[in-house]
Image (tube, rainbow, N blue to C red):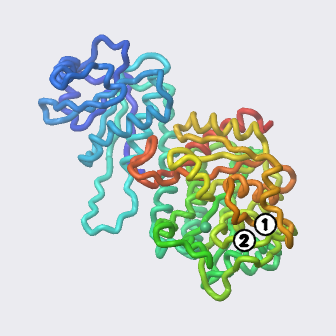
Amino acid sequence: MITIIEKKSQIPTVDLINKTSHSVFVVDEEQKKFPFKDLLTNKLKRIGKKINDLKKTPIVTELQGGGIICWVMASDNINLFQCHTLLRKSLALIINEKPTDISIMLQVEGKLSKLWGEAAVYVTLLNTQSLPSHKKDNKNVPLKKLTLYGADPLIDLNEISSTVVGNTLARELTITPPNELTPTIYRGKIKKLAKQNKWKLQEYPMSKLKKMGAGAFFSVGQGSEPQDAAIVHLSYEPKGAMESIALVGKGICFDTGGHNLKPAKYMSGMHEDMNGSAVVLGILQAATLAKLPIKLDCWLAIAQNHIGPKAYKQNDVVQALNGMTIEIVHTDAEGRMVLADTLTLASRKKPKAIIDFATLTGCMHVAMGDRYSGAISNRPELSCMAIGAGAEAGERIAGFPYDEDYEEDIESKIADIKQCNLEGGPDHIHAARFLGRFVENNVPWLHIDLSSSNRKGGLGAVSSDVNGFGVNFGLKIIHQIMKLRFKI
Ligand SMILES: [Zn+2]
């Protein structure tokens, strides 16, 4: 990030505001006096609106000096997701002009001041990052300076910018076209990141996985040429940290569906099927920058799901790392295959908790659309925490059941378990029940099915379609688990 961020306790003078080019002014209902109140009142009168309408729709006024102010009203009866959404829509009016300098003025009282100040900085930084583009005329104008006036002294700018860097990394990787992010290239990028951030790196390539007996992962990786799939293990170990949390990410660089080939409409965008692993990398990056005092073990299941003479087929039976045999039912259910062995590896290290992120099932998408992601856990408390952490992050999560009797639907006549079933039903729950069978040592495990990883026109704080959903949530839930001293 190249933006210089400054925090100032006072609102600037009228003269100084007149010299700014792009400003956002956040006021609350308590404010009787603030700079340029007349300008705002006149505009509201002209367009037949009241000042309280700013709680829902931002308004722009022009300054004599040529600059613009976008006005928003803070209120305490909306949640953080709504606050982010309002700020994203307001800031879009300014960011569209590609400014190099943005001022945020906060004339807000009490506890709202910290929340809205943090949210305004977060949303501004997120939406001024440059993302990969292959257009000849794509001119990236970086935001050089962001100043927060009237800032609450407790606002931690470093924590916000760390989260933004993590979210941006997740989006960059997810947006990258599949010919530019094959497993080989992706693994190269991860090696570079590991070096920069001093993360320990260990790779489990196909040859090693075969020897270890990780047949669930191997069955997917065998269909690609070159056979460059791998499980990548990264560790962040800050000095003095004792306990560790494991993060697991699905990293399917392209998903054709395999022999049960997807039709064009559903194959389009399948380079984003590695989003879970990108979210994990984003969390790790943000945690490292923010110097989070906890060990993180990240396990990335990187592969492609291709067709070809070696690709796995329906009715194959394969044996997973934990010894269980799996009957293949649908080759497009590759995510749970690569995650199964990865979860076994992660759980064998006995972390305090495992959180996996995966664009796993169409069913979760059917259940909630692309506005929410779903959580399923082998501990009901962890599911509840996920909902809370989602609310705290402005990234909405809903909980789904994990009852044992759902597993009757994936009983196999020939193997220990079926990969999924063709009769329909709640595949997002079946997938979780399936995955749960590969978590060893009864480790508390939370599964996040990322149905909201891409929403046209943006979601919450983020205006790009691919939104990095999960990075902020992940950081918040790690904080919550730490606060509970890992007693889940
Ligand atoms: Zn698939």
Instruction: Identify the amino acid type marked 2.
Output: Val
Q: Is residue 211 left or right of residue 391?
A: right
Q: For this rendering, which residue is in front, 481 or 15?
A: 481
Q: Nearer the viewer, residue 84 or 479?
A: 84
Q: Quadrant of residue 336?
A: bottom right
- 97 vs 123, left or right, is left
Residue drawn at 71 percent across, 38 percent down: 481
Report the residue marked by disc 1: 418
Residue placed under numbered mark 2 in the picture: 329
Percent x, y of residue 50: 27, 19
In the picture, measured across the screen, residue 244 lies left or right of residue 143, that is: right
User: In the image, ligand 1 is in what quadrant?
Assistant: bottom right
**Mark with earlier residue (1, 2):** 2
Residue occupying image coordinates x 66% and y 67%: 333
Q: Which residue lies at the image location 69% right of the left edge and 36% below the top edge?
A: 384
* Secondary element at image label 2: loop
Measured as percent of width and height from the top left, residue 131 is found at: 39, 58
Q: Position of residue 129 (x, y in %)?
A: 39, 51
